[in-house]
Amino acid sequence: MTPIADLVISGCTILEPGLTFREDATVVVRDGRIESVGDDPPGQAARRIDARGQVALPGLVNCHTHAPMVALRGLAEDLPTEEWFNDVVWPVESNLTARDVELGARLACAEMIRAGVTCFADHYFAMDAVAAVVEETGMRAHLGQAYFSSQGRRGREESVEFALRHRGGAGGRITTTLAPHAPYTVTEADLAATAALAQEHGLPVHLHASENRDQAETSLARHGVTPIDVLERTGILDTDVLIAHGTGILDRDLPVLARARGRVSVATAPRGYLKFAWPTTTPVRALRDIGVPVGLATDGAASNNSLDVWEAMALTALVQKSTTGDPRWLTSRQALDHAGPQSARALGLGDRIGTLAPGMRADLVLVDLTGPHTQPVHDLAATLVHSARASDVRTTIVDGRVLMHERRLLTVDVESVVTELTARLPALTDRAHGRRIQDYGT
């Protein structure tokens, strides 16, 4: 007899590799992996989900965020970047405790699960707490302990120790990275040391670089090099590196990125760029032309107010149309490509997640398109990107485990998290001390 499957999802329309759709499909999950995708009636299963009227997609990937910063959502509004950092965010972050980070991460995971995000790349402090939350909530995550050169050598050492301690954690759902903050807060000597440690331990690097045009132009004026040049000459581009934002990547940077010896990827979070009124956005088309995958991201909720990757997908398509002056770029199918395969590749996880195919980890979401805002459906890709919303996600599954079903969260008690976090906010948000963990200046 055929062994009983762990989970069978039947009757759905599935987004297949190649960005084509198959109707009335059955997905069979066993041992955390997709065993088969087909048209056959389901066999025996420990659990079944009837998904008629729903679309099965690869779980969304948030390629760059600071999950615990949901505790700062709405705290620093309508400010230029420098004031946002120096006057509000970094003074508040100097108050952070491990418990604040844990509660923020738990609330963030709840928000992402409800929005169909199954994996996120996090770059923050007290990351042992975040790793524990990832294990508890069932999500997949790519985690790095952030550090500044102002912390001295110990900051870099803690980043390495965290990465080695948690690599492969949560049953393989946690991957890790080294996480220098940015070229404007980490010296070239420390970046070079980070590159050497990445090579020694087989670890990738996740950092902010060329976040905006002002950073790139200031670096050129003062030092004769762009932040991307700095990454090359310190050896960071010889490692597998995820660059957050990159809206300041210049034309002269493209050959540098193209000749990088490591795997280079970029994460784009367009809503934050619009809020800060940055004059440019991530050059997705130019990066795609040189083979650099661009994943979708939200950044932290302190700047974005949301961890909604669904919104990031639609905004990426719209902003690219506007900035290139070409309504044919990005298409809806290209946006789905960035949301799935490219986001997975950006984290070095393209062989595990990002497509729904036999052998891949069973990270998927079921999306209900029966609402009036998604009907009628003439072009399913366009409906998913431009009409559907995060609230249309009915079920979220990671590694074959159902984390949300029919909009009911199964691994996070949101009410208790909010109650405790709210009680802690006065101490967390106090800025009377005037301390900063760092100064922002391009």
Image (cartoon, grey):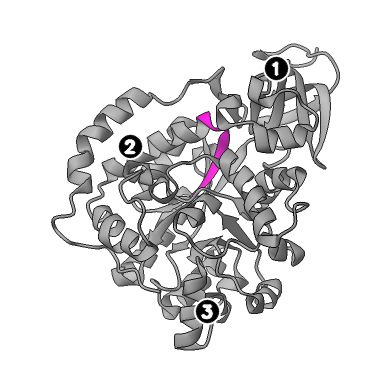
Q: Which residues are magenta?
A: 114-121
Residue 374: give its label.
none
Q: Closer to the N terminus: mark 3 or mark 1?
A: 1
Q: Which residue is mark 2?
A: 103
Amino acid of disc 1: Ala
| Label 2 Cα neighbours within 10 Å, binned few <14 / some 14-19 / many ≥20 | many
Q: Closer to the N terminus: mark 2 or mark 1?
A: 1
SS class, disc 2? helix
x then y, percent, for residue 223: 47, 87
351 relative position to 142: left or right: right
Q: Which residue is mark 1?
A: 51
x then y, percent, for residue 203: 55, 61
Gap between marks 3 and 1 measured at Cα: 50 Å
Closer to us: 160 or 76: 76
Residue 230: give its label.
3
Q: Closer to the N terminus: mark 2 or mark 3?
A: 2
The answer to whether residue 241 is visible is: yes
Gap between marks 2 and 1 measured at Cα: 33 Å
The answer to whether residue 361 is visible is: no
- The quadrant of the rendering that contains the C terminus is bottom left
| Label 1 Cα neighbours within 10 Å, binned few <14 / some 14-19 / many ≥20 | many
x then y, percent, for residue 167: 51, 50
- The quadrant of the rendering that contains the N terminus is top right
